[in-house]
Amino acid sequence: MGQHEVTARLSELTNTFIERHHSSSRQRPCIPLNEDTRYMLDSPCVEHVDEEAGVFYWTPRPHMDFTLFDGLEQGLEVAIHPSITAFYGSYWSDGLWCSSPFGEISLIQLWNEDDMETLRENLLGHAFQKSKRRQGLTFFIGLTADDRIVTVDNHSGEVYLEEAGRPPQRTLAASLGELLRELEPTLTPYTG
C-alpha cells in the first residue's frame, strides 16, 4: 500500500502544481534558458524550447521505474524502503516547493538520467555517513527553507526532520504517504 499511496499522492501534487501554474500564468511551467540551464534540455519533462523568449517549458512525466535503486541496494546490502523507491521512481520532474504544517519544503525529484545517477551517489554518501556515525539509515527526499533535511527512515518508513550529520530531530509523519497528504504545492521556482 505504501508504494501505491506515494505514487498516487505524487500524481495529485504534480497535477495540482500544473493546474495552479496554468491558472496563474496561462502557460506551462518554464525555466529560463541560459548557460546554467542548457544541460536541462535533455529530459523527458521538456515540452517546448522557445529560444526567442529564452525559456523552455516543461511538465512532470510519469516514470514508473521502481528498479532504479537495485544497484544501490546491492552495494549497501539492504533493501530500500518501498516508499522511497516510489517517491523517486514515479515521475520525472523538477523539484516542487510545498507548504506544510511545519513550513515550506522542497521535494527533490529526478529531472533526467544524469540526476538519477547523481542522486544514487548522494544517497550512497548519505548512507555511509549514517553508518559511520552509527545512526539509523535514512534517505533524504527534500529540504526545508532553512536547509534542514526531510528524510525517510529506511526501516520504519517514518518521515523525519534532520540536520546534516545529526540523528533525526523531529518526526513529521508516520509514513511518506501521510506526509505527502499534508503538502500543498506552491508556485515557488525550484532552484535545487
Image: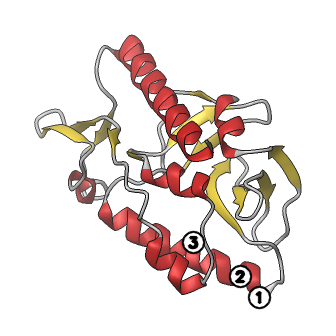
Along the line of sight, which residue is nearer the eye, 51 or 157? 157
Label 1, secondary structure: give it.
helix
Q: Determine contact: label 1, label 2, CB under 8 Å.
A: yes
| Distance (Cα) linking label 2 and label 3 | 10 Å
Label 3, secondary structure: give it.
helix
Tag 1 residue: 132
Residue drawn at the location 57% of the way across and 78% of the way down: 124
Q: In the rendering, which numbered label is found on residue 65? A: none
Is 132 located above or below residue 150 in the figure? below
Q: Determine contact: label 2, label 3, CB under 8 Å.
A: no
* Three-letter residue code for mark 2: Gln
Tag 2 residue: 129
Along the line of sight, which residue is nearer the eye, 167 or 72? 72
* Three-letter residue code for mark 3: Leu
Residue drawn at the location 37% of the way across and 49% of the way down: 64
Residue drawn at the location 45% of the way across and 17% of the way down: 20
Q: How is the model colour-coded? A: secondary structure
Looking at the image, which residue sits at the far front?
A: 1
> Toward which corner of the image does residue 154 lie, by quadrant?
bottom right
Q: Position of residue 83 (x, y in %)?
A: 60, 52
Along the line of sight, which residue is nearer the eye, 77 or 57? 77
Tag 3 residue: 123
Label 2, secondary structure: give it.
helix
Task: Judge whether residue 13 can be spotted in this image.
Answer: yes
Task: Judge whether residue 104 can be spotted in this image.
Answer: no
* 16 sits left or right of 140 in the view: left
Is 31 located above or below residue 182 in the figure? below
